[in-house]
């Protein structure tokens, strides 16, 4: 049995538990060393798993050798391992940035970050919808505490509606699971893909209700209109390293939509074929529109980054709603790009606020930056990437999304909104850049509070955009192969070898 696939879940769990022991509890330096070493190991493990999946191997791991639908199964394929590697790299950059001082603002920073990554990794790897709920709850409970790390009324106020909204979402999730299990008799995703084909009209109606409730929950996690209103205030108030990691959170919701709704309620789902696809298309266009308005009206760099996250969600949902292999491949490339780019901008906003003191990252004239040149370079590269200008990854990703839309009526609706969103980002970055760097007055701070580790963390994320541009060919080949093989589990019986947790290779 290949046990490597369970390490991205078990390793953060053990590291978090060890960090709470008396030997580490009061020693931030020891917690920092342990957590950074474990994160580096996670990057290596994720890269190995991605290398295995790139060969076409689909790893199904049955915990305790219990067979589906009663046992817990993990699924490692091209899609899940791509998201694992993206998350691990993002976590390494976030922790490196946080180790410069944010980790000292409150207790349990490192254990909470590890519990957070355990939940995210589990959500990407699980092959069971109930365990998807479990991992959702783990990452949400950790995020509640991380949002108010360091204290402050603004953080607490922003966290309240985030907590309440997600508690409601969790309740709806449980109701949906009960309906689906009562109708289909399983919560294992490959088993659901088989069972949904054989539903009669009465059972199909109940399963449709459960499926749409799931879509509502995933839409809340992904911040799709009208469930996006929580994101800008919450993300702009959170600590910088925490919100950098949160850049992957909306992708967890989008991943769940791709995994559950494509495999279970996709083209081969009988009476429930392509459930909710029309809703996805309309809501994705409206999400683009509301994000564009938010970008134009953003009063600070972090608010701008928050609305750009919503814009990326709308772009991804447009690609998913087109529902072709080309659009899915484009969505995967764009998802990785937008995660790194948005996280980088959140950290850049924090660098600006550290050197402007009272003005923080608000887009108003203020104190000159002591590190204006290096921060300006990072800001410019981040802007080019997020606007979607050539030659960086944002241009490639958005071009792939637009090229994947071939229907004339869909082009007429989606292309203008995608291009107007980029234009709004160009205007917003031009306004904020000229205000922050050219209209500054007064002397810079006597001694910059920024340390080398913070610059290193931001450069890691910015260079990821350059890497994705230089190696766009191999990366798009991988995402295309992922899109081609993504439906292979749909309707396919689970083999005895897979139930036993062995590796099945699909050609």
Image (cartoon, rainbow, N blue to C red):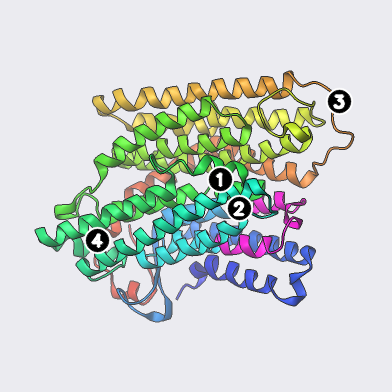
Q: From the viewer's perspective, is residue 81 above or below residue 464?
A: below
Q: Secondary structure at mark 1?
A: helix
Q: Which mark is residue 443?
A: 3
Residue at x 41% of width, y 32% of height: 288
Q: Which residue is mark 1?
A: 234
* Callout 3: SS: loop
**Residue 127 percent across, percent down from the top left:** 37, 65
Q: Nearer the viewer, mark 4 or mark 3?
A: 3
Which numbered disc, 3 or 1, marks the residue that appears first in the sequence?
1
Q: Say left or right for 461 vs 216.
A: right
Q: Is residue 386 magenta?
A: no
Earlier residue among tags 4 and 3: 4
Q: Which residue is mark 2?
A: 147
Sequence-earlier tag: 1 or 2: 2
| Residue at the image point whose x is 21% and y is 55% from the top | 208
What is the spatial separation of the Cα atoms under label 1 and label 4, in whole angstroms? 36 Å
């Amino acid at each position: 049995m290949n046990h490597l696939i369970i390490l991205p879940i078990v390793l953060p769990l053990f590291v978090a538990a060890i960090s709470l022991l008396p030997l580490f509890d009061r020693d931030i330096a020891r917690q920092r060393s342990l957590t950074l070493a474990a994160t580096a190991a996670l990057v290596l493990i994720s890269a190995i798993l991605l290398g295995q999946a790139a060969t076409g191997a689909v790893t199904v791991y049955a915990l305790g050798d219990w067979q589906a639908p009663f046992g817990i199964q993990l699924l490692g394929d091209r899609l899940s391992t791509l998201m694992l590697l993206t998350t691990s790299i993002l976590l390494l950059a976030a922790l490196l940035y946080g180790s410069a001082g944010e980790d000292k603002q409150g207790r349990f920073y490192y254990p909470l970050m590890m519990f957070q990554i355990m939940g995210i990794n589990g959500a990407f790897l699980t092959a069971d919808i109930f365990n998807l709920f479990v991992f959702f709850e783990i990452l949400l409970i950790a995020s509640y505490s991380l949002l108010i790390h360091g204290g402050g009324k603004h953080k607490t106020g922003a966290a309240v509606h985030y907590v309440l909204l997600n508690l409601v979402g969790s309740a709806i999730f449980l109701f949906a699971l009960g309906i689906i299990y009562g109708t289909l008799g399983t919560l294992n995703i490959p088993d659901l893909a088989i069972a949904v084909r054989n539903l009669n009209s009465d059972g199909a109606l109940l399963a449709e209700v459960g499926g749409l409730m799931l879509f509502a929950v995933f839409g809340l996690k992904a911040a799709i209109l009208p469930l996006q209103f929580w994101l800008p205030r919450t993300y702009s108030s959170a600590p910088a390293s925490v919100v950098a990691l949160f850049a992957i959170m909306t992708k967890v919701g989008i991943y769940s939509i791709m995994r559950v709704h494509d495999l279970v309620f996709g083209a081969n789902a009988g009476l429930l074929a392509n459930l909710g696809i029309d809703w996805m298309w309309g809501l994705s266009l409206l999400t683009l529109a509301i994000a564009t308005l938010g970008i134009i009206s953003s009063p600070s760099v972090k608010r701008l980054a928050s609305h750009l996250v919503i814009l990326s969600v709308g772009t991804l949902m447009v690609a998913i709603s087109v529902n072709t292999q080309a659009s899915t491949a484009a969505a995967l490339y764009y998802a990785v790009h937008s995660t790194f780019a948005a996280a980088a901008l959140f950290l850049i906003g924090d660098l600006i606020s550290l050197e402007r003191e009272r003005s923080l990252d608000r887009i108003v004239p203020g104190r000159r930056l002591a590190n204006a040149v290096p921060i300006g370079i990072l800001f410019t590269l981040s802007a080019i990437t997020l606007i979607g200008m050539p030659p960086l990854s944002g241009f490639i990703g958005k071009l792939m999304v637009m090229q994947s839309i071939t229907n004339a009526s869909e082009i007429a609706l989606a292309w203008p909104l995608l291009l107007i969103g980029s234009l709004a980002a160009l205007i917003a970055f031009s306004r904020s850049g000229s205000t922050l760097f050219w209209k500054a007055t007064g002397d810079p701070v006597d001694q910059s509070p920024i340390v080398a580790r913070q610059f290193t963390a931001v450069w890691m994320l910015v260079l990821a955009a350059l890497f994705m541009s230089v190696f766009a060919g191999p990366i798009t080949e991988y995402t295309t192969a992922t899109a081609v093989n993504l439906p292979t589990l749909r309707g396919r019986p689970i083999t005895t070898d897979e139930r036993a947790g062995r590796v099945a290779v699909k050609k």
